[in-house]
Image: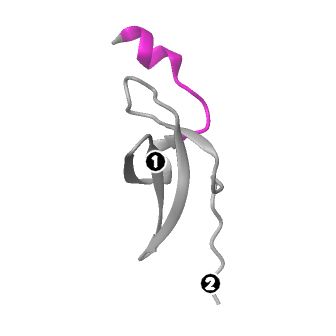
Amino acid sequence: MTIIYNKFELKQIVYLCTDIEQRPRIVTGFMYRGNYLIYELASGMDSSAHYESEISEDKDILITTTN
């Protein structure tokens, strides 16, 4: 039996660390591939898959003010 520890929960609002607009996204699903947990995120009609290291719970206001 494999136990997967996830940092973010379903329906949680998160932000992409590299998104200069810092649009809020919602966690809509999880995928486990090999040894990596991938999060499916949605923003409006768009969805995308990201590693945990690409996601933050907090909005990065520095990235929006410097770009």
- Residue stretch rendered in magenta on the structure: 56-66
Label for residue 2?
2
Residue at 62% in and 84% down: 2
Please identify the quadrant where the N terminus is shown.
bottom right
Nearer the viewer's eye, disc 1 or disc 2?
1
Residue at 47% in and 69% down: 31
The reply to whether the C-beta atoms of the residues labelled 1 and 2 are less than 8 Å apart is no
Please identify the quadrant where the C terminus is shown.
top left
Residue situated furthest bottom in the rendering? 1
Mark 2 burial class by Cα count in 10 Å: few <14, some 14-19, many 20+: few
Residue situated furthest top in the rendering? 65
- The kind of residue tagged 1 is Ala
Label 2 SS: loop
- The kind of residue tagged 2 is Thr
User: Picture coordinates of residue 42 (x, y %)?
Assistant: 46, 47
Does residue 51 belong to the magenta stretch?
no
Residue at 52% in and 17% down: 61
